[in-house]
Image (cartoon, helix red, strand yellow):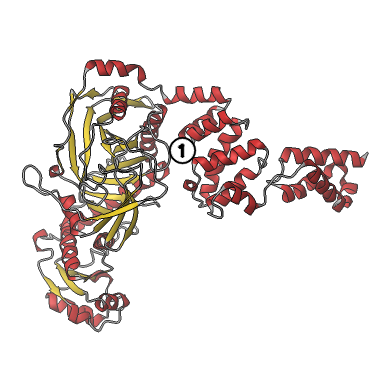
Amino acid sequence: MDSASLDLKVGFEIHQQLATRSKLFCNCSCEEAQKYDHSFVRKLRPTQSELGAYDPAAMFEFSKMRTVEYHTAFGSSCLVEADEEPPHDISKEALETALIFSLAFHSKVMDEVHVMRKLVIDGSNTTGFQRTMLVASGGHFVVAGKKIGVQSICLEEDAAKLIGDEKGVRKFGLDRLGVPLIEIALEPVTGKSDDIMLVALTLGRLLRASKLVARGLGSIRQDVNISVQNGAVVEVKGVQQLDQLVKVIEHEMQRQHGLIVIAEKLKGRKVDVSNVGDKIEDITDILGKAQSKIVKKILDVGGLFKAIRVPAFAGMIGFEPYPDIRIGKELGKLVTFYELDGVFHSDELPNYGITEQEVAAVRSRLQASDNDAFVIVGGPKDRAKFACDAIIRRLQAAVNGVPAETRAATQDGKTMYLRPRPGAARMYPETDIPTIPVTDSMLNALSDKVPRSWDEMVDSLAKKYNLNKKLASQIFDSNYLGVFEEIASATKVQPTFVASKLTEDLIGLQRQGLDASILSDNLIKDIFAKLDSGSIAKESVNIIFERLMKNEARTVDEAIKAAGVSTINDEELGKGLDKIINDNIAVVKEKGMSALSTLMGRAMAEYRGKADGQKINAMVKDKLQKLLK
């Protein structure tokens, strides 16, 4: 699809954790907990704004009626995170970092910083709100010679970490709650997906160049606002990788245009939005004898079925302007938030064990014509009611094209419905924290701390560790810059070797489907410490990486033992190479020195990971020359 003809617009909101010593409103550590020591349970409810209104996103979360279970660890959370104690004074370090970034982006800093409460009751905050503050507005940075506008720079607390989502119960770890975040919202940009990706890449590099931000998976998250011509703005949350970003943009461009095509067809039918869902009937008796496994499962636990009449929608719920883009799929994803398994629509029936006679009976009960569609919802009475209301709203929105909503990015680069877009009722002042004045003297004192550019930082890195520009940029952009510099300064292992292992080789293993997040900094440092001491050979590093990433070992020692890559001494190696040469003496007699490649192949198959490849090559070559003489 052509992004220009669709007038594609993309706006970024970058959420980046700051590398501070403590959390934003208490003295707890920002370190991730290895285990949790205590737990407690809460149920969150929405509150009214100052004008007496309820936020639609909060009401949607409340309708799920979930219990929230919080897990805490000593040192990484306290009574502030549990909402049993008021917030402490704001972290001076975090505020100064936000001001440094404001200066770096040429933004207008606020004279006073006011802390606000942003209503969030999905369980990720014990308080039912997130604390956030506007630090600066406006500004810009340059990408490929073009100015990219900055809308706002905010300082806020990170949300709790989701560690489980069972039926009716969400579990969160409070070790991440309250970690300082900087949120940078950009002006909408246009162009092709690759051009837009370059904007996100450049911004991420600017942040990392400061050395004031946290590194590692999950430390930076991108919310992306995407819209096409004649469509509403859709916010996609949780994009973490750049290659995922391109897929998300292209998927949303196609999905939104597909919904516009559907809306045009519905308008051609002169669909009256007010009639959508005008008749809802209980059809549990009709489906009581159905052979459908899904229907039986719902009925066996006391559930019921309701049918919703959708006038003039026949054929449109299952219509696909693009593969896998249809209203029916949107409805299916929607009801999963109410933990319901049963949703069917007339465009796909009879099917799933529901017969033609049962479909006819439902049509009769609804008094639906051939031009009408219907949707069937099954589940517990209270959840089915909420789901019916949500389905009706979604079908009404289909007439107008793209609904303004919040969606979540999936691992395969697609999106799924998350909740409605929040409204103005979401924000209200924080009453427990006084306003914070920002003076010219504060800004003048911080002006010398504005970070150098990414290019300057990469050039400095390349010079310091004798790396080429490509490898220096790869290690700088990776999640392993910090551990790389620790290893390079603490061992005699060549920095080029360390950098290549932590970038190109790890990426290769990830492409095989292995999980790099298993490799903690301590594990990586242990591997290279053992290489430095001679306990393992260079060739064994990737083998150990692989064992750990496959969860076949929990420690480096276990991985070495499992892979059998402990180093052998020169005497043992020499005896083994003598045996390989004797076993292949016929090849030696026939090819002379040309037999070296054959012998090396056999030797590496036997000793890869146990001895240095260059040492094996030198020893085989020396033994072969002596034998031939």
443 versus 287 height, above or below: above
Q: Residue furthest right?
A: 629
Left or right for 409, reference 285: right
* Residue at image location 55% in from the left, 22% down from the top: 463
Relative image position of residue 438 (x, y in whole percent)? 21, 22
Q: Nearer the viewer, residue 561 or 119?
A: 561
366 versus 515 height, above or below: below
Q: Which residue is mark 1?
A: 479
Q: Report if residue 253 is visible in the image.
A: yes
Amino acid found under the numbered disc labelled 1: Asn
Relative image position of residue 217 (x, y in whole percent)? 42, 42
Q: Residue furthest bottom?
A: 289
Q: Residue furthest left?
A: 51
Q: Secondary structure at mark 1?
A: loop
Left or right for 285, reference 237: left
Relative image position of residue 465 (x, y in whole percent)? 56, 26
Q: Report if residue 371 is visible in the image.
A: no
74 versus 270 height, above or below: above
* Residue at image location 24% in from the left, 77% down from the top: 299
Q: Nearer the viewer, residue 319 or 627?
A: 627
Quarter location, residue 371: bottom left
Left or right for 480, reference 152: right
Quarter location, residue 367: bottom left
Relative image position of residue 444 (x, y in whole percent)? 28, 15
Query: Count of labels shown?
Result: 1
254 versus 178 height, above or below: below
Q: Crowdedness of circle 1 by 10 Å Cα count: few (<14), some, many (20+)?
A: some
Left or right for 178, reference 477: left
- Assign the C terminus to one quadrant of the image: top right
